[in-house]
């Protein structure tokens, strides 16, 4: 129920270690009183967790991280010299070049500090729910902010794209998007591309959640008094500075309850992956466990344990959000 039916039993320590390291990763993000230097581990954790859970050579996540860092600095230099759009293009090209070179080196040195590889089809249990929930919530929040700002943009093309995306995704059931991820999404990539099923599911769940978060944040932006925008203009701030320093911090405070509501719903919706033959916790219970004669007549114990685990996680998220609201004084006194 925790690791699925196919994950190697001798490797259970790997996702367990990744789970406990998650608390160290999230702590400096959730609690501002902690030293900011801890954010370095937060940035390193996604690559470390990937290596622990999926295995393989440690060089691959290292080169992926190098690609992101190189893209960031290339973007800053490009923006400074050629403007935002050109800087973004330079950053993307830099990332792909570094990833291509890193992939070649990692393939040649595949035995360097390597763990036994585990295929995605062997992932399962509550571990799969945690991976999907954590990754999709982390990715959907910044994407939702971008979509909310795009929907309020004065540029017709950007606004139109964001409106169509949000309304289309919100009008389609998540289970339909999961079937698209399982069957259709591979056709949008070049022939011969073997995109991992978990990655396809992450893409679809992130898009689904981002559309709802975008509307929550748009409501927060609309709730701000016009004086906040005028104050930013009076200080001589340009659009990015005004959004980063004044508008978004206030809008996100207002939006905390709605964002948490979407996050809790998203985490529970990760159980829907069982309909596309991914053995998450519910899939393991409905399949291998209940098909065993040892569980005949006492299936309620398995579902009760699953309900308890989900309740603990979701209740913890809810309590943290209430604490954060009190800390940020979002009652507009």
Image (cartoon, rainbow, N blue to C red):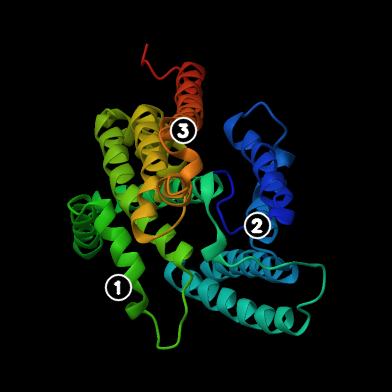
- Tag on residue 71? none
Badge 2 density bin: few <14, some 14–19, many ≥20, Cα 10 Å? many
Residue depicted at x 48% and y 47%: 292
Q: Disc count in the image?
A: 3
Query: Residue 311, image x and y in percent?
Result: 45, 27
Regarding residue 96, the answer to whether it shows in the image is yes
Residue most toward the right? 112
Horizontal and vertical percent for residue 244? 46, 43
- For label 1, the SS is helix
Dot 3 alpha-carbon crowd within 10 angstroms: few under 14, some 14 to 19, many 20 or more: some
Q: Nearer the viewer, mark 3 or mark 1?
A: 3
Q: CA distance from mark 3 to mark 1?
A: 30 Å
The answer to whether residue 221 is above or below residue 7 is above
Residue that numbered label 3 is attached to: 310
Q: Position of residue 229 (x, y in %)?
A: 32, 36
Specify the quadrant that holds the C terminus.
Answer: top left
Instruction: Report the quarter where the N terminus lies.
Output: top right
Element class at badge 2: helix
The foreground one among 198 and 26 is: 198
Give the residue at x 63% y 54%.
Answer: 46
* Residue named by callout 2: 53
Read off the residue under disc 1.
184
Who comes first in sequence, dot 2 or dot 3? 2
Q: Quadrant of residue 77?
A: bottom right
């Amino acid at each position: 129920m925790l690791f699925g039916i196919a994950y190697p039993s001798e490797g259970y320590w790997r996702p367990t270690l990744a789970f406990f390291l998650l608390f160290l990763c999230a702590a400096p993000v959730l609690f501002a009183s902690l030293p900011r230097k801890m954010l370095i581990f937060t940035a390193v954790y996604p690559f470390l967790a990937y290596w622990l859970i999926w295995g393989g050579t440690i060089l691959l996540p290292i080169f992926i991280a190098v690609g992101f860092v190189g893209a960031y600095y290339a973007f800053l230099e490009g923006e400074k010299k050629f403007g935002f759009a050109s800087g973004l293009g330079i950053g993307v090209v830099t990332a792909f070049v570094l990833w291509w070179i890193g992939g070649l080196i990692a393939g040649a040195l595949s035995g360097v500090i390597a763990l036994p590889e585990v295929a995605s089809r062997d992932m399962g249990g509550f571990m799969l729910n945690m991976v999907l929930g954590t990754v999709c919530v982390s990715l959907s929040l910044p994407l939702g902010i971008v979509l909310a700002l795009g929907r309020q943009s004065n540029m017709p093309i950007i606004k139109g794209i964001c409106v169509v995306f949000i309304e289309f995704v919100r009008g389609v059931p998540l289970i339909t998007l999961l079937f698209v991820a399982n069957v259709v999404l591979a056709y949008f990539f070049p022939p011969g591309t073997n995109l991992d099923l978990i990655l396809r599911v992450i893409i679809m769940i992130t898009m689904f959640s981002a559309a709802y978060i975008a509307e929550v944040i748009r409501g927060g932006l609309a709730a701000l008094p016009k004086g906040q925008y005028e104050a930013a203009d009076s200080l001589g701030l340009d659009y990015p500075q005004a959004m980063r320093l004044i508008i978004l911090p206030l809008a996100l405070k207002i939006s905390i309850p709605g964002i948490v509501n979407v996050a809790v719903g998203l985490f529970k919706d990760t159980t829907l992956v069982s309909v596309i033959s991914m053995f998450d916790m519910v899939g393991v219970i409905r399949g291998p466990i209940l098909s065993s004669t040892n569980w005949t007549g006492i299936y309620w114990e398995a579902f009760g344990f699953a309900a308890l685990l989900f309740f603990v996680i979701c209740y913890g998220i809810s309590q943290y959000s209430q604490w954060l609201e009190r800390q940020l004084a979002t009652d507009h006194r």
